[in-house]
Amino acid sequence: MTITSAPVTSTSDRTSRRNDRWEEEARFFDDLAENLDDSELFLDPLALERYSRPDLRKRFNKEFRYRILGQLAGKTLLDVGCGDGLNAVTFAKMGARVTGLDISPGAIQVAQRRAELNGVSERTTFVCAPVETADIAPDSFDIV
């Protein structure tokens, strides 16, 4: 029986690969962000009404997730990987104070624009950073 072990990689190799992955991911989402225009950034009022209902159903995936979150008014929420801000803005429209975190500068710009167009820019903050290095104080959010 032959036993082999995984090759040992140095910390600098792992850091380099991690940084390469972050850069690749940011480029991908930056490219997507370039192709959005303002008309695509408004929340669907029917979707907002559906997910804001007090009687959310368990059998529908997204309704169930909103049901688990409970009432968002007055809560602080961290949206990791917020992308173009669709969920962050929806949460803000439901009364939460939201910090959106994403690795893509382009996606962050779209999220900020989405918040502005939907009237919740004062309830949202967007940070461009990987979650692993983001300057976020421990225990600073009610919901992550």
Image (spheres, rainbow, N blue to C red):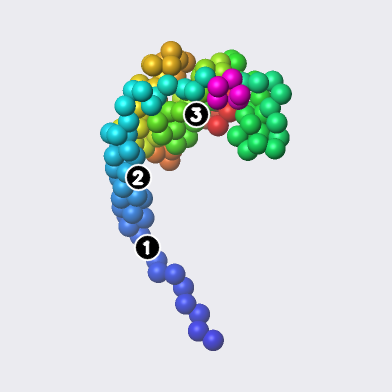
* Amino acid, disc 3: Asn
Secondary structure found at label 2 = helix
Residue 136, image x, y percentages:
45, 29
- Name the image quarter holding the C terminus: top right
- Look at the image and say whether residue 50 sits in the magenta stretch: yes
Mark 3 or mark 1, which is nearer the start of the sequence?
1
How many neighbours does mark 3 have within 10 angstroms: few (below 14), some (14-19), or many (20 or more)?
some
The tag on residue 25 is 2
The tag on residue 47 is none
Q: Main secondary structure of the magenta part?
A: helix
Q: CA distance from mark 1 to mark 2?
A: 22 Å
The residue sitting at 43% across, 16% down in the picture is 118
The residue sitting at 32% across, 31% down in the picture is 36
According to the picture, the residue beneath numbered tag 1 turns out to be 9
Which of the 4 image quarters holds residue 29?
A: top left
Judge whether 44 appears above or below 64 on screen.
above
The tag on residue 87 is 3
Residue 103, image x, y percentages:
36, 37
Point out the stretch of residues depicted in magenta. 46-51
* Amino acid, disc 1: Thr
